[in-house]
Image (cartoon, rainbow, N blue to C red):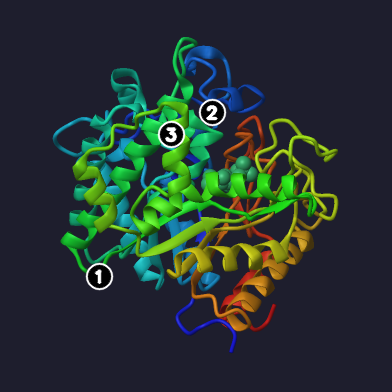
């Protein structure tokens, strides 16, 4: 009993949040490069602000990030020391195709990731590669309007074909789009969308979503054609919706919210638009541009496994409810009174992870993979240089326990678990360093100052033991 043999323990990062080296070896610029830190960041992420530029006077964290571009050997060695079985990382599209629409890839970019994957294998670590983690080449945004354009499907197909060919034998596990459903909250980050005031925003979003879903299905097909050993997963930001109360209006509100969330994985794991989505599009008078070929590609190329991030459960209430609402909250606007929250207001709910695992497994009956889970917190350095992050250990311990219950008692098929993030990096939502997730501390502050030196926190030894005992010793 307990975690199955071969369970994939590890950690997850994203290129723009850790690599830096934004203009090295022929790399082009992406949307995530021009997102400043501070309050302006979320307006840009939401597509409400015209793209900024490096000259604007803001601090752009992705320029240097934690400099993993130059330090990956050292960082991967630390992951190896913790006993990682897998390391989830993302490819920066603009290292491979600097503009996104070239015919030929950039050899230096391809060579970089090849070295990185070889390094992983030297430490017995299987790479798990996210093809796009919130990145889209700026050129594709300027020239084609981002994922609004069907042409991006072709550019993405070219990208994935190059990756699958080049990394055959080095990479088996692939994810097509990180948190594909976050396009609803973060359309610039998720799809390179910047809105004109006159534009039908709903339609632009729906078309972009459709194009990404079709691109994802093509990627799955090409991956299997290139190497039958390839396994391709879809990926959403999960977290089940609870009704605020048993009032039917609250229950219905939770159902509607979860359908909107699961819509993405419904298409990716089942191969067609669910009935509620078809009706919704009809009601809104939106045409996503579905072709006969799209229908077929979606139907024939469903994901091999369903992966997701889990930070919090969510809560929904009917329009007349007296529930407390938090405008702009990422994880649902309704505050769950039974849950404690992190310093950033994210609800902490380990049992919610077991509930989410059951929901997803019931819905899709495909293997699941938790590819992000963790606690963003401010760390304090003690006089002797140590960092005693018991709060992080407690959070992870409770979530791992919930996973074990889902496996042991509910029979959920879970392939692996990668924490977000094994090393401190730039936060996606704030663009700052002080929201830390790592077992490894990085000396860098919110203004981009610091030596970038790495050091082990208390949680480092703890996670190492968890892996060594396959989740027995928590
Ligand atoms: C997810 C993203 C990650 C990551 C994480 C934590 O939405 O996939 O990129 O950053 O959330 O969020 P944050 O960095 O905002 O704390």
Tell me the mark number nearer the camera, choosing from 3 and 2.
3
Image-quadrant location for residue 467: bottom right
Instruction: Provide residue 208's location: percent of width, then percent of height.
Output: 38, 32
Residue that appears at 36% across and 62% down: 119
**Mark 1 or mark 2, earlier in chain:** 2
Q: Quadrant of residue 428?
A: top right
Q: Is residue 247 left or right of residue 106?
A: right
Q: Residue at x 62, y 21 (%)?
A: 40
Q: Are marks 1 and 2 in contact (CB under 8 Å)?
A: no
Q: Which residue is mark 2?
A: 45
> Gap in Å between the C-alphas at discs 1 and 2?
36 Å
Numbered mark located on residue 281 in the image: 3
The foreground one among 160 and 17 is: 160
For the view shown, which residue lies furthest in the bottom direction? Answer: 1
Question: On screen, 407 above or below 228?
Answer: below
Do the residues bearing badges 3 and 2 touch, measured as CB atoms within 8 Å?
no
- 107 and 293: which one is in front? 293
Q: Quadrant location of ligand 1?
A: top right
Measure the C-alpha gap from mark 3 to mark 2. Answer: 25 Å
- Badge 2 marks a residue whose secondary structure is helix
Q: Residue furthest top?
A: 198
- Name which of mark 3 and mark 2 comes first in the sequence: 2
Name the residue beneath numbered marker 1. Answer: 229
Above or below, 51 relative to 110: above
State the SS at label 1.
Answer: loop
Whole-percent x and y of residue 188?
47, 28
Q: Nearer the viewer, mark 1 or mark 3?
A: 3
Q: For the residue carrying disc 2, how many other residues have a C-alpha within 10 Å: few (<14), some (14-19), or many (20+)?
A: many
SS label for mark 3: helix
Q: Is residue 117 above or below residue 49?
A: below
Name the foreground residue: 27 vs 269. Answer: 269
- Write the residue at 16% across / 60% down: 225
């Amino acid at each position: 009993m307990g975690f199955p043999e071969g369970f994939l323990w590890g950690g997850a990062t994203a290129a723009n949040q850790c690599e830096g080296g934004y203009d090295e070896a022929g790399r082009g610029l992406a949307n995530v490069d021009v997102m400043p830190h501070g309050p302006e960041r979320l307006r840009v992420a939401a597509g409400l602000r015209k793209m900024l530029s490096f000259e604007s006077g803001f601090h752009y964290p992705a320029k240097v990030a934690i400099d993993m571009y130059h330090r990956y050997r050292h960082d991967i060695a630390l992951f190896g020391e913790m006993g990682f079985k897998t390391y989830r990382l993302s490819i920066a599209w603009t290292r491979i195709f600097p503009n996104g629409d070239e015919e030929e890839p950039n050899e230096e970019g391809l060579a970089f990731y090849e070295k990185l994957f070889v390094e992983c294998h030297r430490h017995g670590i299987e790479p798990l590669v996210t093809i796009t983690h919130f990145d889209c080449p700026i050129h594709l945004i300027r020239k084609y309007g981002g994922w609004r354009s069907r042409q991006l499907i072709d550019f993405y197909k070219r990208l994935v074909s190059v990756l699958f060919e080049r990394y055959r034998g080095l990479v088996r596990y692939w994810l097509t789009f990180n948190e594909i459903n976050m396009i609803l909250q973060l359309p610039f980050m998720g799809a390179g969308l910047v809105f004109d005031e006159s534009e039908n925003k709903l339609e632009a979003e729906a078309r972009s979503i459709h194009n990404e879903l079709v691109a994802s299905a093509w990627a799955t097909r090409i991956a299997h054609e290139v190497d039958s050993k390839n396994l391709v997963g879809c990926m959403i930001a999960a977290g089940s919706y609870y009704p605020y109360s048993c009032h039917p209006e609250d229950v219905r509100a939770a159902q509607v919210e979860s359908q909107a969330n699961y819509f993405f994985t419904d298409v990716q794991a089942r191969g067609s638009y669910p009935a509620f989505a078809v009706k919704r599009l009809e009601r809104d008078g939106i045409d996503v541009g579905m072709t006969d070929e799209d229908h077929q590609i979606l139907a024939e190329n469903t994901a091999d496994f369903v992966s997701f991030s889990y930070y919090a459960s969510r809560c929904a209430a009917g329009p007349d409810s007296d529930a407390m609402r938090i405008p702009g909250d990422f994880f649902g606007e309704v505050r769950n009174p039974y849950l404690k929250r992190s310093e950033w207001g994210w609800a902490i709910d380990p049992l919610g992870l077991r509930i989410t695992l059951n929901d997803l497994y019931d819905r899709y009956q495909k293997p699941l993979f938790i590819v992000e889970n963790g606690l963003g917190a401010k760390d304090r350095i003690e006089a002797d240089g140590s960092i005693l992050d018991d709060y992080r250990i407690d959070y992870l311990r409770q979530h791992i326990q919930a996973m074990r219950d889902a496996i042991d008692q509910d029979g959920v098929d879970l392939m692996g678990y990668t924490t977000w993030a094994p090393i401190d990096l730039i936060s996606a939502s704030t663009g700052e360093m002080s929201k830390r997730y790592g077992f490894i501390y990085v000396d860098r502050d919110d203004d981009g100052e610091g030596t970038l030196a790495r050091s082990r926190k208390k949680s480092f030894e703890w996670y190492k033991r968890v892996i060594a005992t396959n989740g027995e010793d928590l």
